[in-house]
Image: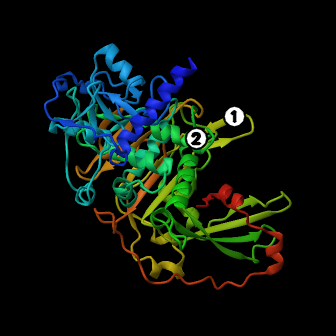
Amino acid sequence: MAAEDARVKRARVEDESDDEAPAKRKGKQEVPQRTDCPYLGTINRHVLDFDFEKLCSVSLSGDNVYVDLVDGKYFQGRGKDTHAYRHALERGHYVWMNVSDGKVYCIPDGYEVVDKSLEDIKFNLNPEFDEEEVEYTSTRVRFSKALDGTDFIPGCIGLNSIQDSDYQNVVIQALCTVIPLRNFLLGWQAPTEKKPDPILNTLSQLLRKMYNPRNFKGLVSPHEFYQAVGVATQKKFYAKQMDPVAFFSWMMGYLHRKIRAKDGSSLVHDVFQGEVQVKLSPATDEARIIESKEKTIMLSLELPDEPLFKDNLDFIPQVPLFNLLEKFNGEKPFEKIAKGGEAREIRRYSLRRLPPYVVCVVKRFRNNNFFVEKNPTIVTFPLKGLDLRDYIHPDCQPANPETKYDLVANVCHDGKPERGSYKVQVFHQPTSQWFEIHDLRVTAVLPQMVALTESYIQVYQRQDVKSDGSFGKFDLEIPEMSTEMDTGVAAEIEMAPEDLAEAGIIIG
């Protein structure tokens, strides 16, 4: 048994060296090529699925893996005494593709198959887009058809839910509407000199598969990305229902660390990061004010409490979004217990800098120490022309000349707090149409229906963002705060990041 295992490992190593560097091996010839393979007719494209982890079905190893183009199974190696070689002889499946470089081989004959009819399979294995295709993603209307006849729109495609992963799916669908970040991920290439980051690599592959116009199935399974997230978070976001706000916050922080430049800036912060001014004062003496500014990637909005007495059981309260945004007018007070519970403080918020994309979070869920309760209040909001000028600090308005936003994504929650599901409504720019995506189901919806859902996360795009992802960068500096601070009060009221997060400002 040990001798057989040694032969399998030795054959695997020799086979791997054949694939990677045939010219370096002395005394042996390169793999011959043929264009007249008689087994091309046995390929079954209906069973090919490149969304799952590419591991050998027997050894569960990811090294030197080949896919059987007849039944879609993965096996290791192609030399003698390897799992792929034995499977080819036992089942009579002779056409195999290397999942790393896309080369097709005939096993056991041992030659490489060169044929133009295999290009669609290679493209589905690893879709790639050039700069022109990425640039026109937001303007070019494309309709595609899967092998089974299903019609789909590239970029507006369903994602398979894997063990309650709908909270991840809605975040991915919402990110597809953020043009600069989407274009970056579509054009991202894994580095060849080192092992690519698993999250960034699988996220880029997932978006390229979603925008693949030659997709065989008309849907995508985010299995590899889901596994990478589970490993990176030590299974915090794995195999259970979680909050999409927490997942979005974690993923943006992770991407910022991985793609940031030497000066600390990154595309994530360029797109999402804004600046909020906070005024603090003790509840006993509101004349003493401490001003501070904080960076944020999300704006948290508090819903008013449900009315205690309702006219009827079917009554659902409604509130305009502008009422919730009054939180940032600089005058509305928010009372909060200071850190340690020793004193109460009053906080007032105003905006200092508006990013190209504003993410609003409607706080629907509240934990009352016994269970999680959900506020079903419907928030009415405009789909186009949301003006945030009234919520900008007067000193900072000249530095924010463009203040109007259009809604591009709306994440909703259906059902009870702990057993509900998430869905997303996205604006497809090429067709100028709204679509509702709930896992695998993609349906067109009227714009009037978007405002009737229980919104949880909203993504607004500034109107100066162009179709290629470029946006205006204003050179006018934001003035520094000039209010004098009382150092004695500063010692009493200490602002910690967790306090800001609880108060409604989620730190990036």
Disc tally is 2
Residue at x-position 46% and y-position 61%: 358
Residue at x-position 23% and y-position 39%: 214
Q: Amino acid at mark 2?
A: Val
Judge whether 277 appears above or below 12 on screen.
below
Q: Is residue 504 left or right of residue 12?
A: right
**Residue bearing mark 1:** 371
Q: x%, y% of residue 466?
A: 30, 65
What label does residue 458 carry, if any?
Answer: none
Give the structural element (helix, strand or loop) at label 1.
loop
Q: Earlier in the sequence, mark 2 or mark 1?
A: 2
Of badges 2 and 1, nearer the viewer stands 2
Q: Is residue 492 left or right of residue 348?
A: right
Judge whether 128 appears above or below 404 on screen.
above
Viewer-proximal residue, 324 or 358? 358
Viewer-proximal residue, 198 or 471? 198
Badge 2 crowding class, 10 Å Cα cut-off, few under 14, some 14 to 19, many 20 or more, is some
Judge whether 182 appears above or below 32 on screen.
below
Viewer-proximal residue, 284 or 33? 33
> Where on the picture, by quarter, is residue 116?
top left
Q: How is colour applied across the structure in the image?
A: rainbow
**Residue bearing mark 2:** 231
